[in-house]
Amino acid sequence: MQTVQLLGAILFGLALLHTFAAKSIEQLAHRHPRHAGLFHLLGEVEVVFGFWAIVLIISMAVVGGGENAIRYAESRQYTEPLFVFTVMVVAASRPVLAVVQSLLGGLARLLPMRTELALVWFGMALVPLSGSLITEPAAMTLAALMLAPLVFRDELPEWLKYAALGVLFVNVSIGGTLTAYAAPPVLMVASTWHWDSAYMAQHFGWRAALAVLFNASVITAVLARHLRPHTNSDSDSAPVPLLVSAVHLAFLALVVVFSHHPVLFLGLFMLFLGFTIAYQRYQQPLIIKEGLLVGFFLAGLVVLGGMQQWWLQPIVESLAPTALFFSALGLTAITDNAALTYLGSLIQGISPQSQYMLVAGAVAGGGLTVIANAPNPAGAALLRHGFRDASIGAIGLLLGALPPTAVAVLAFLL
């Protein structure tokens, strides 16, 4: 096993390097048009971890035999990738978006400010906080689709789009901590440590809400002079009947309720697909491709991340509470924060203070990279076309996320 573990760590490191180099690989497609297809494929951030997970399984088969490789692949838990794929497609359907846009548009018109300014603030603040009810992946999907035509446009400065993306990712990561079931890193420890939604609201929720509102207000003020009124491209389509919207919202609610039962939410998804075909005139193309890419990314992270426990857990176990907070903050940037808190849940006799510091650090760092938080690949897939070369650079995202991450750190520590 030690050989396989070392191999897993090396391939995980290569996957991280590939993630940071994805934008440069994408640019090679323009310089070498003969192999543009291959460079476009390898330059897709959502492909990276799935690709290296396949390399890991093949390598395990060569080193330890095919049966061992298959046994390891089948031992992984793929509920989260399947759920993120499902909830992305359902939440991004036209009837759901029409309801959200209508509701937020009505609220925006009541405020004493420009409508587009209010909509950006809602997308950066209220929608991420709603992730505590509808789950973080659904909130990320709705916020990304809502903000794309307003903020992530070609004419905006690139640095400003990265700043907005950083705020969105950080706010979604901490915005789901008002309840005990919506944020993946919280879900991993909630039952083991007996954290309910009342506990989350008391210890995390109000701090997260303050940080979210502050971050959203600052980025909205910075964006103000760059925003212009947005005309709804959906206005020429057939109006969505109330009953159709209600059915879509019911599907979304049921998928969220059964988010830990893949057999049930995938069954509901099949019914949802049938319903969209039956009432196709009220639909737009579903984001099946984007959802599948995100699911592939997260499944690859599950496979590769499962081989990192041997070096991650000793680090988590050996640290004092404050050091644990900042270590979790940093480690989250290179591994999924839910995997990190899961390792913490395995530690026997961990103190309540260390429990808080581990989870606080993990969610505070959830916007630093695409892999730091499960909903981030969904946001990246939906917003990357607003960036140069239709690719999100890892360094740009890191720099954009640092200021809102610092606000989250202060909120959880002070």
Image (cartoon, rainbow, N blue to C red):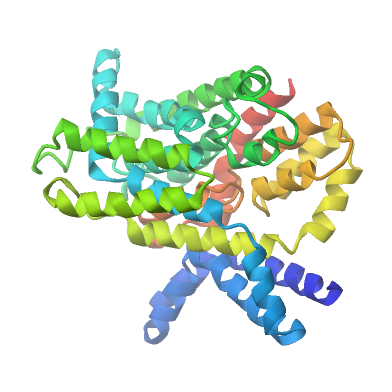
Residue for point 47% across, 29% down? 133
Q: Is residue 191 above or below residue 413?
A: below
Q: Is residue 178 above or below residue 166?
A: above
Q: Is residue 397 visible?
A: yes
The image quarter in which residue 92 lies = top left
The image quarter in which residue 249 lies = top left
Q: Is residue 213 above or below residue 80?
A: above
Q: Where residue 275 sits in the image (x, y, percent)?
A: 22, 49
Residue for point 56% across, 57% down? 78
Horizontally, is 249 left or right of 182 in the view?
A: left
Q: Where residue 140 sits in the image (x, y, percent)?
A: 44, 41
Q: Nearer the viewer, residue 143 or 66?
A: 66
Q: Where residue 151 sits in the image (x, y, percent)?
A: 35, 40
Q: Is residue 56 visible?
A: no
Q: Nearer the viewer, residue 360 or 346?
A: 346
Q: Nearer the viewer, residue 112 or 154?
A: 112
